[in-house]
Amino acid sequence: MPTQVTTEQVKELRDNTGISVMQCKRALEEADGDMKKALAILKKTSSDIALKKVNREVKDGRVGIKVIEEGKDKKAVLVSLLCETDFVARNEDFTNLLDRLSDKALKEGVEKMKAEAKDMIDSIIQKTGENIQLGEAYEVSGKVLGTYVHNNKIGVIVSLTGGSAELAKDIAMQVTALEPENEKALLEQEFIKDTSVTIGGLLAKAGAKIKEVKRCSI
């Protein structure tokens, strides 16, 4: 006979994992009410489900950018999370997952986030029924940063030496819209807000130079 588990135990496990009430109840029964064992059972189940979906094409998703002040410098992370359909890309569990992955990358570093992403992703695969994969993840630091996200599908971070945050954001918008192949092509492009000047001219006028650009699109 399965161990009788309490409603409170099921609620605690569900709150910790976000997985359905019935799955939590079954895991607790199998674990004889032991919370740690139940968590391990759910983790294995999530991993098994994710493995079965790993070859399904992920052609949708979202990008997210987060920025933090670090003394006189700023740090930004750009993270993309991929799924199969726009329906899941708009799902609250999926958007919250991207938010948590981005927070972890910002606070603990991109490599630490990548190392821990699988377990975080697997439980959401179990909930949504779709293959979900971590896409690109970048970290950019500098005194002058500009960021831009378009429709949650394209994200850009620009770091400048000199200039202003407003200028960096304008250049991020430019890179979002026109996707130059390299920095030389970007410098020669007409500025989308004022075609009488190039990006190179805009930077020269501000006494600024491009330090780093990261772009990600889905």
Image (spheres, rainbow, N blue to C red):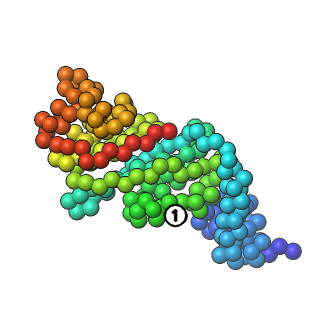
Residue at the disc numbered 1: 115
Q: Residue furthest top?
A: 196
Q: Residue furthest right?
A: 1
Residue nearest the observer in this picture, 142 or 46: 142
Q: Residue at x 44, y 55 (%)?
A: 102
The answer to which image quadrant residue 87 occupies is top right
Is 42 left, or right, of 159 in this rendering? right
Q: Position of residue 101 (x, y in %)?
A: 48, 57
Report if residue 34 is visible in the image. Answer: yes
**Total tally of numbered discs in the picture:** 1
Instruction: Check the image and report above or below for 136 versus 200.
Output: below
Q: Residue at x 64, y 48 (%)?
A: 131
Circle 1: element type: helix
Q: Residue at x 25, y 33 (%)?
A: 187
Is 46 left, or right, of 138 in this rendering? right
The answer to which image quadrant residue 84 occupies is top right
Residue nearest the observer in this picture, 153 or 12: 153
Is 127 left, or right, of 190 in this rendering? right
The answer to which image quadrant residue 72 occupies is bottom left
Few, some or many C-alpha atoms within 10 Å of disc 1 (few <14, some 14-19, many ≥20)? few
Residue nearest the observer in this picture, 86 or 117: 117
Q: Position of residue 42 (x, y in %)?
A: 69, 65
Instruction: Check the image and report above or below for 122 versus 149.
Output: below
Report if residue 127 is visible in the image. Answer: no
Q: Residue at x 19, y 26 (%)?
A: 197
Residue nearest the observer in this picture, 141 or 71: 141
Q: Amino acid at mark 1?
A: Ala
Instruction: Check the image and report above or below for 60 versus 137.
Output: above
Q: Position of residue 150 (x, y in %)?
A: 41, 36
Q: Position of residue 152 (x, y in %)?
A: 45, 40
